[in-house]
Image (cartoon, grey):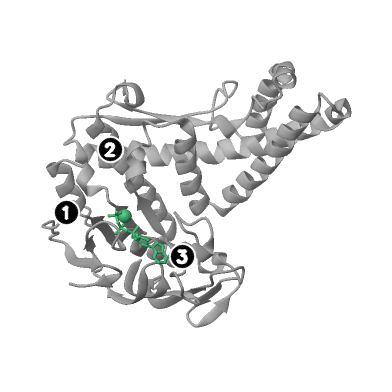
Amino acid sequence: MILETLSLQGFRNYAQADFEFDPGVNLIVGDNAQGKTNLLEAIAYLGSGKSFRAQKTGEMVGFGAEFGEISGTVFSQERRQSLRFVLFPGARPRQIWRNGVKKKSAGDIAGVLPTVLFCPEDLMILKSGAAQRRRFGDNALCQLRPNYDAALTEYNRILEQKGRILKDHFENPRLLDILPEYNARLCQVGALLISYRARFYDSLGKAAAVYHNQFSGGAEAFRLEYKTVSTVPDVFAPVPVLTENLLAHSRAHYRAELESGQCLTGPHRDDFTVTLSGVDLKAYGSQGQTRTSAISLKLAQRELMAREWGEEPVLLLDDVLSELDPGRQDFVLNQIVSGQVFITCCEPGRFTRLGKTMEIKQGRVIR
Ligand code: ATP
Ligand code: MG
């Protein structure tokens, strides 16, 4: 997928701006608070209808503007297509247009302009808590597999209801009558999640290992391992077997759950680990190894999406350049040769041999 042009009107600090992009690397430079991340947000939103930073849609409408508009032309699925979003400041629903036709939901534009974002927080994904890694994995998998998205939503709904039962049963013991039903359903849907995740992490780990190998000049063997509930001996087992595994764990923790009032069993606590040549990265990895591994993971995510859609998703790298040493910067600027890449950075003087550089100042392209 190639984003060829983009127009912003009343979007964040862009009153009106038009862009033409390179099919390769687009380096976006500018001082702090000039609109670099806003531009990446607009691109990601145009492709997904989701913002990686706004809590409410209205936040993205420029201060004082009556509406905000993001529109662009994309070369995707072997033809030129147009996408357009119109956003409003209050409760009025947004409008979505594809090729001039108004669409009901963001689902109707899926696959036209998928993006993969990498921001500074992601650099530490392998050092931070399990929740961040789960979020990364879930986001990636939801984009790849809409059925996983649906299963995850259902799982979280049942989990919340079970959590309420476990909290309230002290005052209302009759709630315990319905607990087995919730446990059974949670294990069924949980098993489905594990099955999806096992396959996803397996492919992701293998693809990331190839990138990490290039990054590290073949010095380190990257290995990713998916971790789930302890009573699951084989994550690739059929879903009914996984369901039984989860039920066994659930039964063993029944008392403990009632006493603690907390849900102690299920794949909502899953995680994954990375080892480099057998050494655990979370415990022992250096900063450089941690960052390189994180970028390898994101590039791997993009590759899995490319296999799925048949085209490379647009890669958005926000502010990660300055965190890397010169050799790794060169890799990012000059050696990610496939697909379209947007890279923001604050330091002037950076350039790429594979595309074009533009400078942003106060919501305008000045060069
Ligand atoms: P940095 O290098 O610090 O990351 P940046 O170029 O990425 O900077 P952005 O986050 O893109 O900066 O832009 C931030 C600017 O956009 C802020 O000055 C903020 O006030 C402004 N801004 C954010 N939302 C809106 C909005 N809805 N309307 C107008 N301006 C906005
Ligand atoms: Mg920024």
Viewer-nearest residue: 118 or 114:
118
**Mark sitting on residue 347:** 1
Q: Quadrant of residue 363?
A: bottom left
For the C terminus, the image quarter is bottom left
Q: Is residue 207 at least partly visible in the picture?
A: no
Q: Secondary structure at mark 1?
A: loop
Instruction: Inspect the image, locate mark 2, and give the three-letter code of the amino acid beneath it.
Output: Arg
Which mark is first along the chain, 3 or 2?
3
Quick check: is the Cβ at mark 3 less than 8 Å away from ligand 1?
Answer: yes
In the rendered image, residue 26, in percent from the top left (x then y), is placed at 23, 63
Q: Residue at x 32, y 56 (%)?
A: 316
Nearer the N terminus, badge 1 or badge 3?
Answer: 3
> Is residue 169 something one can see in this rendering?
yes
Q: Residue at x 61, y 72 (%)?
A: 92
Residue holding disc 2:
291
Q: Secondary structure at mark 3?
A: helix
Q: Which residue is mark 3?
A: 60
CB atoms of marks 1 and 3 within 8 Å: no
Circle 1 Cα neighbour tier, 10 Å, few/some/many (<14 / 14–19 / ≥20): few
The quarter of the displayed image where residue 225 is located: top left
Which sits in the foreground, 276 or 116?
116
Report whether the residue tagged 2 is closer than 8 Å to ligand 2.
Answer: no
Mark 1: which amino acid? Glu
